[in-house]
Image (cartoon, grey):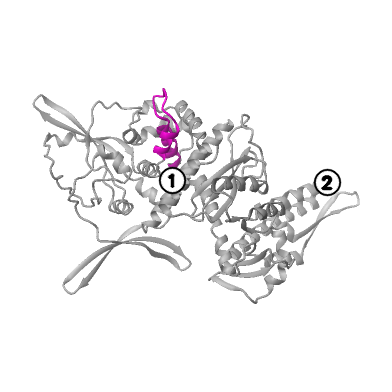
Amino acid sequence: MYLRKHRRQVGEEAYEYWTLVESRRTANGPRQHTVAQLGKLPGLDAEARAGWESVDELLEGRSPAKQLELVAEPQQRPGTAAQWREVDVRGVRVERVREFGEVYLALSLWRRLGLHTLLGELIPAGREEVAWETVACVLTVARFCAQVSELGVAERWYQRTALEDLLGLRWEQVNEDRLYRGLDQLHAQKEKLSQHLLRRYQSWFGVRFEFLLYDVTSTFFEGQALGNTKAARGYSRDGRPDCKQVGIGLGVSPEGLPLAYEVFAGNRKDVRTVQEMVGVMEQKYGQAERIWVMDRGMVSEENIEFLRPRKAQYIVGTPKSQLRQFEAALLDQAQWQQVRPDVQVKLLPHPDGQGQEQFVWCRSLARQEKEKAMLARQEQRLWQKLLEIHGALQNKPLPPEEAERRVGRWLGRYPAADKLFEVGVQLNAQKQACALSIACCVDRNQWVRQAQGAYLLRTNCTEQDPAKLWSWYLPLQQAEAAFRCAKSDLGLRPIFHHKTERVEAHILVCFLALALWRTLEMWMKGKGLGTCARQLVGEIATIKSLDVVLPVRTLEGVSQLRLRTVGRPDRLVAELLQRLELYLPEQSRTVENVVQKNGL
């Protein structure tokens, strides 16, 4: 993203304004998309500027300043006497450069969600030197900044940030033992934290819980995880079947805001988690009628029968094996409704004719192209491997069992393409495998290509508009996006803890960091800044805090004056902060007795 300046001449008057522009790649080349109209950049603020003494007010959005200054030369603060010193400019230097922007943003979200107040009430003060609310804040802010281990936070990361100034927590007080004990204290507050976030979502964004999106993912361990009763080997979504894992079921709102989660054994199938998660959500929201949205991995007749008597409506994807029952409707070109330039839908009654359920055929051109490319790649690779086995058998015959194992190994590696081939092992006079017979299964091949880009939805909703039913299912992508964010941006994987409670506390911290992240996206959307939080965080992370050391002349001789300040952001970053109404401490403060730590 970047700022673009516009100038408009109306008569003799010239007007200037700015827009926030994002460059996007399209099939026709890069195109610029206007994200927000920013208007005229403000000038100097005539009011008092806040300093470090007002950090708490700034973090909670109660700044005495109303606008962020964007010009290069700040004016004198009204009512404040100037403090002049004679400085040797050749001896001026900068020390203790710290990461400020990213932790400041995370801490602002933590404060504005009221998590500091909630945990302060939930965890009574005891004999601890550091409040557990502060420890929980450090853990969540570190996870928001993608720090993967408590040990790394204590030994390296905390010292590189400005959290010591923002929280008043000295770096000597941050150690791995205190962070581990903080995980234990936080784990006991899981339910209260979820309920608090729900209330915040409702008051901030007006979120309603008529739709609940549910999906399951997994995250793996480094090590054997012998102390975790839920760690087991199962289907790995991370491509690590060699590692033990746990499953995580997450419920989110259609906006992508995380509502609740549960941790399951790593070998538990997705379909067996639905009933437990429905029970958890009913405890939180009651058994009111709402629509559950789930993908095909959650669908079973047992789960459908479980939902019906609970007055729950559902829209679920169906397994691929069920698509063939509706082949005629898919091939029939009548009654398709265009909902997007590349998406069509069609409503179908249930074959039993009882009217309790209906189906929606959906076909997407973009999805068709993707599946076609994936299948072509698998088909080509599998064909090449089968030809290699065929040539090897011709040169050196093998026992039939060994040849079949080789063929089966590659068929299992490319499951989408193995249905397109019929492979047999030919034997010679010595009953040895000497060649392969490879044939293309025409019927399967034709059906696979016809079904590319198509998927089937199953629902008991009485709505007769297939476009609306499809639009209700589409937000399920928000649950998948939440998992991608937790794994890629927040460092959910891998897990280094081994005890069951510590693992669940680690996932709770990731859940809170995800709540901060998705709240930031909603905040950006409300301010007209799009929803790309990753890019905004990267821009704000360029802001640093630093100490400016000035050699000054006094009556006693020459001494050093150390001023702690926040670097002035670039114009683009300053504009983003202004749009978010996120204020920075603009006045420096004098600091003394600074000790360098580990060369930092």
The one nearer the camera, 364 or 180, is 180
Question: Furthest-bottom residue in view?
Answer: 334
Q: Viewed as shown, does residue 384 lie left or right of 45?
A: right
At label 2, which amino acid type do we have? Glu
Question: Which disc, if any, is residue 401?
Answer: 2
Q: What percent of the width, then of the height, locates residue 70?
A: 23, 52
Crowd rating for badge 2 (residues with CA inside 10 Å; few <14, some 14–19, many 20+): few
Q: Residue at x 53, y 58 (%)?
A: 475
In magenta, the rendered stretch is 115-144
Q: Is residue 583 visible?
A: yes
Q: Is residue 185 above or below residue 449?
A: above
Q: What percent of the width, then of the height, locates residue 161?
A: 36, 36
Q: Which residue is mark 1?
A: 516
Q: Disc 2 and disc 1: Cα gap in Å?
A: 56 Å
Q: Secondary structure at mark 2?
A: helix
The one nearer the camera, 480 or 160, is 480
Q: Is residue 525 above or below residue 491?
A: below
- The first of marks 2 and 1 along the sequence is 2
Q: What percent of the width, then of the height, locates residue 587?
A: 22, 41
Assign the magenta stretch its main secondary structure: helix
Query: Residue 468 is drawn in which quadrant?
Result: bottom right
The one nearer the camera, 475 or 38, is 475
Q: Viewed as shown, does residue 565 lie left or right of 480?
A: left
Q: Viewed as shown, does residue 548 lie left or right of 131?
A: left
Q: Is residue 490 visible?
A: no
Q: Secondary structure at mark 1?
A: helix
Quadrant housing the N terminus: bottom left
At label 1, which amino acid type do we have? Leu
Q: Is residue 18 above or below residue 281?
A: below
